[in-house]
Amino acid sequence: MAKYKNYVLAQSLEEAYALNAKKSAVIVAGNMWLRMCGLSKQMAIDLSALGLDKIEEKEDAFLIGSMTTLRQMETHGALNAAFGGVFREALAPIVGTQFRNTATVGGSVFSRFGFSDVSALLLALDAQVVLFARGAVKLSDYQQEAWDRDIITHIRIPKGQRAAVQSVRVSATDIPVLVCAASVSDAGLRLVLGARPARAQIVVEHLAPDCGAETFEEIAARTAFGSNLRASEAYRRKIAPVLMMRAAKACREVTQA
Amino acid sequence: MSGKKSGRVIGGVGVPVPKKDAPALLTGKPVYTADIAPRDCLCVKLMHSPHAHAMIEEIDVSRAQKLPGVACVLTYKDVPGTRFTQAGQTYPEFSPYDRLILDRHLRCVGDPVAIVAAETEKQALAAIRLIKVKYRLLPAILDAREAMDNETLIHPEEGWRALVPACGADNRRNLVAAGEEAQGDVEAELAACDIVIDREYSTRANQQCMMETFRAFTRIDTYGRLEVVSSTQVPFHVRRILATALEMPKSRVRVVKPRIGGGFGAKQTAVCEQYPAIVTVKTGRPAMIVYTREESMTLSSPRHAMIMHVRLGAMKDGTIRAIDLHTLSNTGAYGEHGPTTVGLSGHKSIPLYTHNMKAFRFVWHTVYTNTMSAGAYRGYGATQGLFAVESAVNELAHALHMDPAALREKNIVREGETMPAYYGETAQSCTIDRCIARAKEMIGWAEKYPARTLENGHIRAVGMALAMQGSGISGVDTGAVMIRLGDDGIYNMSIGATDMGTGCDTILAQMAAQSLECPVDNITVHGVDTDTSPYDCGSYASSTTYVTGMAVVKTCEELRKKIVRVGAQLMGCREDEALFEGSCVKKADESKSVTLAEIANAHMTANAEDISACVSNGSPVSPPPFMCGCAEIDLDPLTGEVKLVDYTGVVDCGTVINPNLAMRQTEGGLLQGIGMALTECPTIDSLGRTVSNSFLQYKIPARVDAPSIRVEFAPSYEPTGPFGAKSIGECVINTPSPAIADAVYNASGVRVRDLPITAEKILLGQKE
Amino acid sequence: MNVEFVLNGRRVSAIVDADDSLYKMLRSLGMHSVKCGCETTNCGLCTVHMDGKAVLSCSVPAARCAGHEITTLEGMQEEAARLGACLAGEGAEQCGFCAPGLMMNVFALAKENPHATAAEIDAFLAGNLCRCSGYVSQRRAIMKYLEQVTGEVRA
């Protein structure tokens, strides 16, 4: 259980940022995973009063507040319409509706958990992380960084893409054994592998959407996989090309639809 | 004698009556242990061993004791020196007396090092962090195959005692049980067989995962006695266990069982009661322990992991002539249920194939290891043994190119046959042939066996397995029932059997209603209290409906006689002229009658005779329920993923007392079996730490994992059972693992002999 | 710290620690229907409504509830009796320990998608674990309840 002595409902991002500058502070988002880790902090900073729970459609992108719940994204009409229903499909296996009503996209992105379906999908969609101090950074860069003291205010997802996810799970609502997220845009096919079990990463970009099976074999061969309770490195390596091939195919089919 | 289904009764036998406690449970009333605990209970927490095998060299609790709110910190120096077992079994227990409340010698990761009680949970947890311990590490035995005669002894202590030496326990060999049973010359028969399937199978230490974790609270009652309110299946055993552990007279202990949030055998072991109990004894204060889910997954009473070597001999025509089974069972750090579970692996698998059997041999060993102590889990060894034997039968079918259903039909036990491998009992009621026929029909076996490929490349396949269990422990289990006639003719029924959500309160009331020819609402039932309830060994071993149910029948017989006697007195006639009619007693010639209310009320006025009855029941036999289960799976050949498409089960549990509740038992048991087969993977790491320590890491099925489970009954009539009933609770968990394993083989050519059946084992496995 | 919020339609206040959960606060206020079955957000037993949405009370910080509306099964007794009758009619409650959390999520389902198909019911309630029932009877009972809610008769 996480422990903290004080709880502050931040009234502004400035206040939250200033308070969070200290290592003894922690931002509370959905509190799903935070409460499970053994953290002991002086202060918890709650962002829930800052109106960061909105999904806004801009001309070239969707801007999603960091306190937006996974369930909001899963059920958001415009967001799903723009990306072929991929949020509905990708987020539905995550534990249960109550979990997704509480878990936030900011929490998922900040935590950078290897098993995150959310991170894998957002990486495939070339999302940007909008940070209070640093401004917008590419998720693919942010994903590689260590935890810092900045605060995620939004996630920005550029339009003009189609995406699909494929995963293998021990049970239907479990975290994935391996997840592959794919997107197709003018820049070609981008593939992301998550739950390797290390952090999700883009394994290829600018690929021809209709590339052949040997390409996926080759990508899998140069990607790092590991073992954990759910599966071995060898199993992940063997199914990776299958998931990539299926995700790419699903992407193509969405594009044509 | 076995109860008659005479006359129409509202809510009698065979009626799907809602459970008597349903309205309370479904409006969220405070009826479970933690809901009714006093608000000033001390919070009890345990400090757990981080090591699989260690000796406490030094322990310093001085800083913890000084923390505000801390009421006591107890170590091995503070507990009584009498060893006991936590197993909820009839005395003298087969399980050895091998544990203390706290011990210097720590035998598994999680073993309690200290007990802390404080005003709040936070204070108790903070105090634990202040306890300083110096451990001396000992070599740990984590593999059951290395345990027997290892130079490291897990229980070298002087005070270790086996109350039943016949089980072959020997702490100098890390053995909790060893034995052999045989009939005929199994080696000669196997040598004469055309084909012998010789295989090894293994199962893991599955967790019951009842939704309410282990918990109990204790206090000193009005009379200065220790009152224990516990979520337990075995209140009377808990009384004895605590009295032994605390070196108290049994008269000083009272155990109360409120509503329970599931048990499945987990709560047939007194996993947690001794901790708040000793706190209350030491401090005089009420104390409560509520296990976290992690504690419930790491220091509890899971299924015994077993390694089973089967040799199954048959002729070319498919007649099964001999079975040789060796089971190695891992009881973990302590011996709870170790000697008994292992027996069921043979006793409840081999007898299924009695029909053509010429010889059998069953050899067993149960060993200590430095892993969490195992306990009782629904199926209790039969589940493990049936995975092995049923898988071997399926393998035999493939080797002979026979339909596994046809192979079974040829060899299964028939009604009226004596089963030498089942204590020589006779199958007096058995419709297993009808179970097979109907389960096949329901799944569409004829069209679907063995497999077909779908357009998307996935493979659909079916598999089958049989199961049996017992109905109570013959010659041991005992249940008494007391029924009193009250104002206006109500009946108060007291039972010591423990409803753990299964609905036995209701089922037993239905039997009483049937016997007393009254509406079920006229029978009141309540929870168990060792001070006031009649003795019952508890709800386990599939005993309640069969053993305690028969006690209901017998009690009602006696009560009816008493009511008739008083009725006759009131009518001024002889007893043999009076008839019991449920709502009244009347003269056989119909010239006079007196209502039950008049009898009840009259007997409360200056009457010398109390109209109540209390009869106990035990059974010399344990008639097996039987079932057939068929699985249809969808296998993705490129990832190895298996989805359960459909599961059909047909059960012979004798007469079905409450169709709804029997059906829920079956559906629920099947799903637990499905989880065991596919997703539940108990795992320890190289240091003996349980990694599958939460619902995040131990995946029990969600409702999306098994959307179709279909159950029917093929009732037989068991002459020794109440209204012809046998048991249902455990038999139903046994078929999924072997049935799904065979479906997977039919789809992939890969035979998985070690549970669970994972996508990885299928994809990376060798095709046969 | 002091948290003021609306519990089952009534303004209440509670003294909590900064790191207390909504679950703990509700139990301390006598809301015994709210149960806890895990520490890892997997079981759904602690489900309550926060501003009309089903949430896991084990994960919502108590302090975050200030000014919000929280509803537990204690505050929905009439609906509980109605849905409860459907569940009891199937014997689907068994031990009953998971029932309050399940029922709160069924109420959320009835609001969001009262015409849910069997598969949609399963998907919506996937985060409500039950170890007793095998789930299929719960689905039948919930279908019956939704029929009552919507007045439509299903095949």
Image: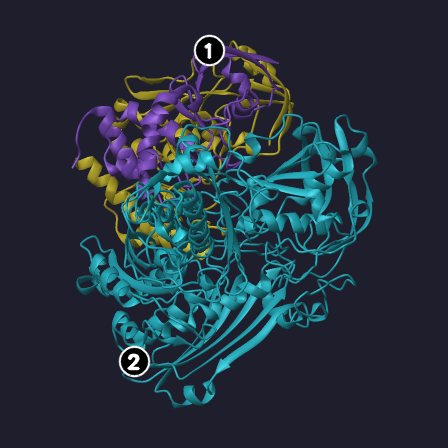
Q: Are marks 2 and 1 in contact (CB under 8 Å)?
A: no
Q: Chain B's colour?
A: cyan
B650 on left or right of C11:
left
**Which quadrant is home to the C terminus of chain A?**
top left
Q: In this view of the protein, which residue sits in the foreground, C139 or B554?
A: B554
Dot 1: what SS? strand
Q: CA distance from mark 2 to mark 1?
A: 72 Å
- The residue indicated by pointer 1 is C10
Whether residue B119 sits left or right of residue C7 in the image: it is right
Chain in purple (letter): C
Q: Position of residue A103 (x, y in %)?
A: 44, 28
Q: Which mark is residue B318?
A: 2
Pinpoint residue B327: horizontal percent, then vertical percent: 52, 71
B55 or B335: which is nearer to us? B335
The number of callouts visible is: 2
Q: Nearer the viewer, mark 2 or mark 1?
A: 1
The chain containing the residue under callout 2 comes to B
Image mark for residue B155: none
Q: Amino acid at mark 2?
A: Gly
